[in-house]
Amino acid sequence: MIYHTKSHRRCRLPVITQTRLLEHFVAGTPARSAAELVSVNRNIATLCYRKLREIIAEQIVHDAPFSDKIEADESYFGGYHKGKRGRGAAGQVAVFGLLKRSGRVHAVMIPNAGHQTPMSLIRQKVLTDSIVYSDSWHAYDKLDMSGFHHERVDHSRHFTQGRGIENFWVILP
């Protein structure tokens, strides 16, 4: 019942079991622990959690666009690698993020951090006439001519104190 959307089949679990798993999902209980507490197979609980995450991800795609003051940045994640770090490091995954100041965050894995990928995401998710704060990376140069008010933050001089997209990257695993 909970999972009936266009891309998901109807769940065959009893509604009470679905509801209990949903409650554990919202409470942050790991799927394996929730499976024991609800008395279902751990694979079923894991599948249920995955479907819930997919539904949330679909809903996020359709959320209202960002407006006002927005921070844009990219970051790289992956295991420990010797040598080059950040842009151009082998084996790391690029993630692009938008943060509405005092609001929500939109982060998505990107295939590459070339100038077209961040710009297309900004055009999709940010209303024109918004103020977009970014670092001085050349991929953000086109913001100046795209209907956005563009402000650059010089990270060699200062970071946003206590909040901001850089602090969001820090809390991710």
Image (tube, rainbow, N blue to C red):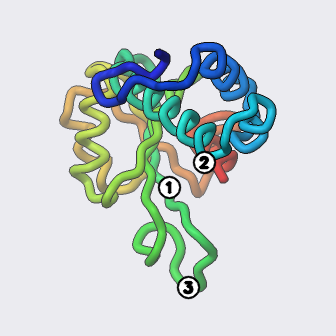
Mark sitting on residue 9:
none
Residue named by callout 1: 75
Q: Residue at x 67, y 44 (%)?
A: 42
User: Mark 1 vs mark 3: which is more N-terminal?
Assistant: 1
Callout 3 secondary element: loop
User: Foreground residue, 90 or 72?
Assistant: 90
Q: Which residue is drawn at 26% across and 42% down?
A: 119
Residue 99 x %, y %? 50, 31
The reply to whether dot 2 and dot 1 touch (C-beta < 8 Å) is yes
User: Furthest residue to the bottom?
Assistant: 83
Residue 153 x %, y %? 50, 44
Residue 51 relative to residue 157: left or right: left
Residue named by callout 2: 169
Callout 2 secondary element: helix
Residue 33 x %, y %? 78, 40
User: Mark 3 vs mark 2: which is more N-terminal?
Assistant: 3
Residue 80: which quarter of the image? bottom right
Distance from the alpha carbon under mark 3 to that under mark 2: 21 Å
Of the residues shown, which amino acid type is indicated by label 2?
Trp
